Structures are given as structure tokens and as C-alpha cells.
Amino acid sequence: MNGPILDLVGIWTVILAVGVFFYVLLDGFDLGVGMLYGLTRNSAHRAIIMNSIAPVWDGNETWLILGGLALLAAFPLAFAIIIPALYFPILVMLLALVFRGVAFEFRFRDKAHLGFWDNGFFWGSAFATFSQGIVLGAFVQGFQVTGRQFSGGPLDCLTPFSLLTGFGLMAGYALLGAGWLLLKTEGELQEWARLEGRRALILVVLAIAVVSLWTPWAEPGIAARWFSWPDIVFLAPVPLVTAALAAGTWVTLGQRRDAVPFALSIGLFLMSYLGLAISLWPFIVPFRYTLWQAASSESTQAFLLVGTLFLLPVILLYTGWSYWVFRGKVRADAGYH
Amino acid sequence: MTLDPVLLSRLQFVWVVAWHIILPAFTVGLASYIAMLEALHFWTRKPVYLAVSTFWTRIFAVSFGMGVVSGIIMPFQFGTNWSRFADATADVVGPLFAYEGLTAFFLEAAFLGVLLFGRKLVPAWAHVFAALMVASGTLFSSFWILAVNSWMQTPAGYTVVDGRFLPADWTAIVFTASLPYRLAHVVSGFYVTTAFVVLGVGAYTYRAGKFPAEGRLMLRMALGFLAVMVPLQMVLGDLHGLNTLAHQPAKLAAMEGLWEGGEGVPASLFAIPDQAAETNHLDIEIPKLGSLYLTHDWNGKVQGLKDFPPENRPPVIVVYFAFRIMVGCGLLMLAIVVLGWFLVWRRRLLESRWYLTLVQWTVPIGFVAVLAGWTTTEVGRQPWTVYGLLRTADSVTPSLTGLDVLVSLLGYMVVYLLVYPTGLGFMRRIVLTGPVPHDPEADTAIESGRPAGPVIALPQGGQS
């Protein structure tokens, strides 16, 4: 399937990987912010917390659509197997995202049911994240496939491992959310975010450690990838850098730093993401179909690539601009005067 | 009764897409209207444009948020419930979906934040530009999703290999035979839908008395716009019908309730089609008229339903009545517009309370027409997902059980029945409050980089 000049599948793998990572980061921090929202009862703080993501959440969630559509267009076989296999986690995620999304507008227009929409925002964020964690865990474990279709049951995706990744991702997004709040807030709320960030970090490190031991233990192919000679030498930096980033995040959360913990926790996500990618390479439907086997036709990938190479930088440009417009610290009282 | 995953998946798709389509039907037109008001305010500096724009932006914020979240659900439906459709067609339609995301969704999302919260943060021209970009995004989105839909209705530019569609000619895939007609008819329908909402809300605002100038502006703009768009929409509808006759004759026969084809076919005014007996009950028809408006010739030849094997016919009764509801709405719209202009000519529009009341009642008329038109074309496509090539029954996810789909359908029903009425209630309240300079519930302006948007109305925050 490889073209003589350009390896389209390779390029689309990179685009999809970057797209999904962008989603995880961007919606990750604002889903995390949504979960932290539920952990405070202080309504002034809640106001700031929600305001810190109000102008950007919609764009962040758009990366989810892009990820889904890029998978459909570039790797349709993977889309047609993975999405049905994750029927219920995806259903829960979508319904949770509905609640969370409308809460931005609804909670302040519906004071009679403020508590209901507050809960919708918190539980919506929590369930959406948990479902995404289940999706991740089930994906890593692989699916029962017959021919070009998923052939397992609807609850196959609920395993001890996927529950672990579900809770692990909640901690991870909460860590990103805390990092974002450090960036956007100050004073008492910022101190609180530091504390919550450290709590989340402990759980994140635990989850990463358990996943790192569990996956090679359960899947001999993954063990061979990491522990065979000489791969072990080349791959050893991955866990080492991850550990260093975790330590750095911990330390800087305790210092008077606004931006560094967020940056380091992004690094932590990047390393975990890289680790999983190394474990699963070159599969897109783990242990069944490779990226090349699941790819759409060369003509399809080429047709979409032409526009994407032009549009993606433009998107990044104006998305960056909209973040720039809303830069700086958020204060609850400032807008009223 | 056993639970049929195909039937339930179809019901679920109907449920999520029907609720979703209501929002673009409104926001596509409203985004353009807001962009126009913003531009008019930028050039004329008349405060009335700003007041009306701010007012509609408030309503837009509520409806757009609902549109986004109900829209995220849509692409996943193709995976969760229609995975065989996805596997068979993604090589062809996948990039069209992806281009919708790339050209439209990001544009809307990024500039919406600036439109809603950024009036004081960016220069005036940049705010107008943001409004224009949001409006463009909604139109790009319409183009791509209708390109996908048109390919499903009138597929072209493909080859079939092992039961899967592969691309052969991208120009033919994107610009299929029905796309120009469908795109024009749908977008114009969306604009008309929004204009009827603006007309009714303008009438209310004028009558409520607190903001007569704003109400008058809305009335005048909507009535002027509709005078062009309603007749145009009827012409476009007629052209779309001719296109359907050429490419999807079975759908057209169902729209007309026409069992026996031939030359000089009658037009059915009312009937109750009976799929099993292959005939109509209570038929009221006008001889030869059907051929005239379908082929623009008294003796034009039209195929009937019996020209197609029973297993290739759509559910006639649904298509037949949906089409009549759409056309009925169109005629009613025309009557309202003609009446309105008659009153304008007699200089009695603003004094005619009965007319203002009437247009308040017809606020939802465009939505009814859009849903009926959409039902006509999509149910008319049955029993195929890709017309004539891939059956709906062969498109569903094979691993699904009826129970799985029942559970998810109930989930979507509960959530939508909670969210939609709530959102509608908020929009109603914004209308009742009127175009006040500051939203009493939220001041969406952001000063010095601090979004004071959605959470300003906290008890200790005070009112602006």
C-alpha cells in the first residue's frame, strides 16, 4: 500500500496521533477543571473556575470530532471495529458531554435549578472522563474481531484494567485542570489548585506505574517490545523521563510557579502517550489490524491530506488567537465594575 | 415482539438527527443575520442595530451550545450503530465529513468565543469579522454535510471493490447530481426558518411596547427578506423536485402517492396510501396536473411505484404526508408574506394587531417545514442508505442486539427531553425580556481579559 514517494499512512498516523493528543490535552484540562469544580463549595471560586474555560471549551471539544472523523476517513476499518466495540462507554461519554456542555449556558439562566446544572457540569465532566479512560483501557487490551467487524459483547470493554484506566484518566485530567487553574487564577483559589494538583499527581503516578507493569505482564508482545535487547536501551529513557517529569511536577506544584506545573504535566501526558504508542505499534486495532491494513485507499488519504495540510495550520493560528484574546488571570469580581 | 436492532437504530438516528437539525435550521440563518447586523452597526453606528444584534446573540449562544453538543453525537452514530455503512462508504464520504470538521467546526468554535465574550477585548472590526467567520462556518458545514447526504442520494464517482465503495473521481463524488439543488433548497429553507422566527419575535417586541424601534427593525428586515426568499424557495423546491424525478423516481412516486405510472399522470390532493394493497384510499386527484408540475408538460411521462419491485419502495404513507406538510407550510408562508406586504402597502402593518398576533403564532412554521422536508427526502431514500446500492438493513452494526439499542435510545430520549425544553424555555425568557442593553442574567462582555460570562449572576457577584 505504500506509495513510492510519500508514505501517506505514515503521515496520517502522525496527524491522527497529534489530533488525539491535542484533544486529550485541551479537553483534558477543561474536563479536569469541570471535575475540580465539583470539589469546591465556594461559589466565588466556582465562578472563576467556570469562567476560566467558558470561551475555549467548545473549540477544545471540536478536537474530539476531528479525531473521530480523521479515524473514519483515514482508517475506516478501525473506526468500524472500535466504535461499535465501545458502544456503551461512548454513549455515556456523549450524554455526559451534553450535560456538561449545556451547563455553561444553563446554570446561570436557571437559578431555580442551579444545583442541578452544577451537578450536571461536575458529573458530566467526571463521567465523560471516566468513559474515555474505559475507552483507552479497552483499546489497549484489544477487541474480539471476526473479519472486518467487532464480534464480542457490549460489556467486554468493562474489565479491571479498563476500570483502572478510567480512574487513572480522571486523576490525569484533574492534574491538567489544576495546572490550568494555576495559570488562570491567583490567591486562595490558586493555593487550593496546587493542593488538588498534588493529590491528583499521586494518583496519576500510581496509575502509570500499575499500567506500565500490567500491560507487559498481560501481553507478551508488549513485554518483548520493552525488555528485549537492545530495545531496552533505546526505550529506557521513556520511563526515566516520565519519572523525572512526575518529580518535577510535584516540586513545582509546591513552589510559586504559575506555568511550569502545567507544562510539566503536559510532558507527563506526552510520555505516557508515547509509552502506549510504543507498546501498541504498529496496530490501530490492537493485535489484529495494523495501521496499513486498516488504512483507507491511497486516493482517499491523498484527497484529505491536501486540504488538511493547508487547514490545520490555519486552525492552529486562529485557535491560538482566540486563546490570546482571553489571556491573563480570571477574576470573578472584575467584570462587574 | 422481538427487538429489531435495525428498526431501533433507525429510530435512534431519527431521534438524534431530528433534534439536531432544528438547531442548524435556526443557527445557520441566525449567524448570517447577526453578522449582517454587526456589519450594519459598524458602518452606520446606529445603536438600534447593536441592540438587536446583542439580543439575538444571546439567543444564539443558547441554541449554538445545544447545537454543538447534539452535533458531537452525530458522527459517532455512524460508528456505534451503522458500522457496516461506515466500513463500506468511508473511503468515499469519510473525507467529506472530515472537511466539515476542518473547515467549519473549528472556525465556528474559535470565533464564537470572541463573538460572545470579546466585544470589549478586540477592535470593532475584529468583532464584526468574528461574526462573519461564525456565519461562514455554518455555511461551510452545510455544504459538506449536504455533499455527504447528496452522495448517499445520488452516488457517483466511485467503484465497488469487495462490497466497498472506493473513490474514482473526487469532483464527481463531491458535486453529485443532487447537490446543487439540495444545497440551495436546504440553506434557503434555513434562512426562511430563521426569518419567520425574527418576524414573530419582532412582532412580539413591537407589541410589548418597551422596544418599539427594535421590534420595527426586526419586522421590516424579516418581511423584506422573506418577500424575496419565500418565492425563491418555492422555485428551488420545484427544481429539486425535477432533479428527484430524474435521479430517484421511486422517491418521487412516493411523494405523489402515484402507483400507476404513465403519461399525463394526475396530481393527488389527498389520499391514504396503502403499501400492502398497492393503492390509495379516499383519492382526490386532478387529472394531468401531476405531469404538468413534475415534468412541466401536460403529457409528461412519470414512473409509478408499481414500476419498482415492492422491496425497493420507500414507506409511501410517510413520504406522501411529509411532502404535503412541507408544501402546505410553504403555501402558508407565501400567504403570510403577501398579506404582510399588502398591509405595508396600505400603511397598516404596525396597527394590524391581528397580523402581528398571526406571525407570532407562525414562529415555528419553518421548523415544521424543514423537518417535513427532511423526512420526505430521507424516508424517500429508503430502503437504501446509498441509493440503489447499499440497503439500510445491511448497514447496521452486526454486533448490536435490540436491547443494546433500546437502552441507548432511551438514554438519548431522556437527555434530549430534559435539555431541549429547558433551552427553549431560556430562549423564550430572553425574548420576553426583550432587547435590553444588558442581559439581566449575564453580562457577556469581558473586560480586561476576564470572561465575566456565564457565571456573573452569582448571589455575591451582584448585577451589572
Image: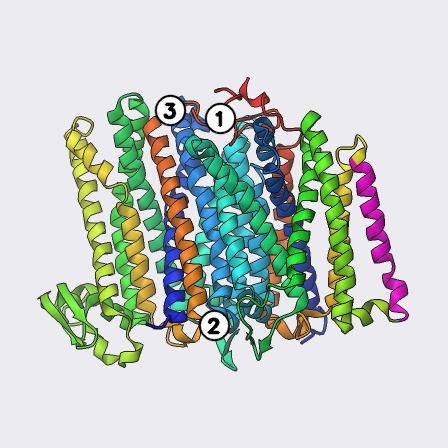
Say above or below: B18 vs B320: above
Query: CB of mark 2 within 8 Å of CB of mark 1?
Result: no
Residue A310 magenta-drawn? no
Q: Amino acid at mark 1?
A: Ala
Protein chain holding label 2: B
Where residue B288 appears, as percent x and y from the top left, is: 12, 68
Q: Residue at x 75, y 55 (%)?
A: A208
* Most common SS among magenta residues: helix
At x 73%, y 48%, the residue is A203
- In the rendered structure, the answer to whether residue A24 lies left or right of residue A236 reads left
- Name the front one of labels 3 and 2: 3
Q: Earlier in the sequence, mark 3 or mark 1?
A: 3
Q: Say what secondary structure mark 1 lies in.
A: loop
Q: Is residue A166 visible?
A: yes
Q: Which mark is residue B457?
A: 1
User: Mark 2 against mark 1, which lies toward the viewer?
Assistant: 1
What kind of element bears circle 2?
A: loop
At label 1, counting other C-alpha atoms closer than 10 Å, the crowd grade (few under 14, some 14-19, many 20 or more) is many
Q: Going by the picture, which residue comes out furthest to the top?
A: A337
At label 2, the amino acid type is Gly
- Disc 3 target residue: B48
Q: Is residue B68 above or below residue B325?
A: above
Quarter of the picture containing the N terminus of chain B is bottom left
Query: What stretch of residues is rendered in magenta?
Result: A229-253
Real-space Cα separation, disc 2 to disc 1, in angstroms: 55 Å
What residue would you read off at disc 2? Answer: B157
